[in-house]
Image (tube, rainbow, N blue to C red):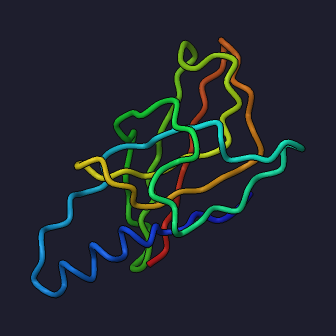
Amino acid sequence: MAEAVVANIYRRRIAARMAGGANIAPIAFMAFGDGGHNADLTPKAPSANATSLNNEILRKPLAAITQEDLYSVTGKGAIEANEVVGAGISEAALIDANGNLVGLKTFAPKFKENDERYEISIKLRF
C-alpha cells in the first residue's frame, strides 16, 4: 500500500494562510473511489498534483481525526455494509469542510460485499 500524500493544492493554501491569506478549513470528510488501481489490480502511485480522486463514488463525514504526533494527522472513515456494494474501493482522500482535497492514498482494490464494513485510515505527514 502506498503512503498517503499531501496534495499540493493544500500545501499552497497553507502557504497563502501563513502570508495572511484566507483561513484553512478543518479536515471533515473522507472520499472513497474506485480509480486508484491499474488494470492488473496493482495500486497507482498517488500524485501530490491531484485535485480530486480519479473516480469518487462516496463521500462521508470522518469517523475520527487525531494528531498522533507533532507532524502528522490521521483521518478515519468507514464504509458501512449497505454502501457501495460490489465496488472495488482503491483510493481514499481527506477533504476539508469546504470540499477541498487535503491528501490521498491509493491501494489494491477491496471489493465491497454486502455484509462487510470497511474502515480506512489516512495519515498525512507534515
Q: Is residue 109 left or right of residue 58?
A: right
Q: Is residue 119 left or right of residue 11?
A: right
Q: Nearer the viewer, residue 32 or 8?
A: 8
Give the residue furthest to the bottom: 19
User: What is the total number of numbered labels drawn onto the structure image?
Assistant: 0
Q: Nearer the viewer, residue 76 or 25?
A: 25
Residue 9 locus on image (x, y percent): 38, 68
Residue at 44% over, 72% down: 8
Residue 105 on image: x %, y %: 60, 56
Residue drawn at x 66%, y 13% is: 115
For the view shown, which residue lies furthest in the right direction?
A: 40
In the rendered view, does 54 fall on the left or right side of 75? right
Q: Quadrant of the N terminus?
A: bottom right
Q: Quadrant of residue 73?
A: bottom left
Foreground of the two, 73 or 101? 101
**In this rendering, is residue 60 above or below 68?**
above
Residue 85: quadrant of the picture: top right
Residue for point 69% across, 23% down = 112
In the figure, is residue 6 to the left or right of 41?
left
Q: Is residue 111 above or below residue 5?
A: above
State the image coordinates of residue 27 (x, y, percent, origin top left): 31, 54
Viewport quadrant of the C terminus: bottom left
